[in-house]
Amino acid sequence: MRELLDAVADGTVSPAAAEAELRGYATGEAGRFDAARDQRRGVPEAIFAEGKSIPQVVALAETALETTGRALLTRVSDPQFAALEDYVAETTPDATIHRHSGAVRVVTADYEPPSLEATVGIATGGTVDEAVADEAEAVCLDAGATVDRVDDVGVAALSRTLDQLDRFRDADVMIVAAGREGALPTVVAGLVDTPVIGVPVSSGYGYGGDGEAALAGMLQSCTVLSVVNVDAGFVAGAQATLIAQAIATARD
C-alpha cells in the first residue's frame, strides 16, 4: 500500500491506476471503468460508444489506457473515432489504433498483448454481416487468439459453404454471423465438431426483418449451437475467447 501511495506521490502511477489496483475499477467524469474485468472474467471491459457523447467516449478511453494499457471500444461512430484519434495523437503518440468497422482497439507501446494458442474461425453469410463479425474479431484478436476469417459463404449457394469446411473444422471454436433467415450457423454446426456460436444480424426486410427471423431460426436449430442476441458481435467474440482460453489451458 505504501509503495503504491509513494508512486502516486512521485507521479509514476496515476490516481486512476492506483484506484484501479485497489478497487478493481477507476472512477472518472464519464463513469466507472472496470479495469480488473480481464483478470476476473477473462475478457476486458469494452466501452460501448453508441449513445455516449464524444467527451465521454474519449474520457473512458483515457481511463482504460491509464489503467490497463489498452482500450477496446464498440459501436464507435466516425465523429467519435476522429476525436479519439486526435486525443491519442496529442497524448499517446506511440500508441497504435486498430479499427474494425465500429470496433476500435487502442494499444499503448508498453502494453504486452496476451498470446492465446487457439484459433477462432469467423464466417459470415454475406457482406452485410461483416460489420458485426468485425466486432467479434476485434475481441478475439485483443485476447491474442488466431482468427481465421471467411466472408460471404451464405447458404444461397451452398457450394460456397462446403468449399470452406476444412477451415471450419480446423478451428477450435466458430463464430458464424448471418442475417435473413439465419441458416448459415445451423448448417455449419451440423458439419463440424467444434463449438459454434451463431450471431443473428439485423439484415432482411418485411416479416421477421431486423434480425428477428435469423434469431428465431438459430434458436430453433436442430443442430447444436449457441446463440447470442441480434448484432451482438462483442458477446460472440467474448464467448469464443472464453472457450478458446479453456481449450488452450487444456492443451497445456
Image: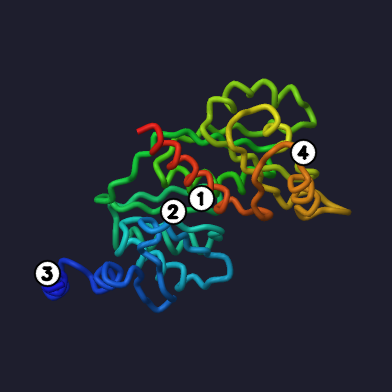
Left or right of 103 on screen, residue 13: left
Question: Which mark identifies residue 238?
Answer: 1
Q: Position of residue 162 (x, y in %)?
A: 69, 22
Residue 116 marker: none
Alpha carbon distance from label 1 to label 2: 6 Å
Disc 4 element: loop
Q: Which residue is mark 3?
A: 3
Residue depicted at 30% across the width and 64% down the height: 67
User: If you read the primary sequence from the N terminus, does the residue marked by circle 4 or circle 3 appear first?
Assistant: 3
Asked if labels 3 and 4 touch by Cβ distance under 8 angstroms, the answer is no
Taking depth in this image into account, of 76 and 147 the one nearest to the observer is 147
* Residue at 61% in and 48% down: 132
Q: Earlier in the sequence, mark 2 or mark 4?
A: 2
Q: Residue furthest bottom?
A: 29
Residue density around tag 1, few if under 14, some if 14–19, many if 20 or more, within 10 Å: many
**Mark 2, residue position:** 43
List x then y, in percent, for residue 109: 27, 50
**Residue 35 occupies quadrant:** bottom left
Q: Nearer the viewer, residue 177 or 62?
A: 177
Mark closer to the observer (1, 4): 4
Rounded to the nearest angstrom, the CA distance separating label 3 from label 1 is: 35 Å
Three-letter amino acid code of the residue under disc 3: Glu
The amino acid sitting under disc 1 is Ala
Residue under circle 4?
222
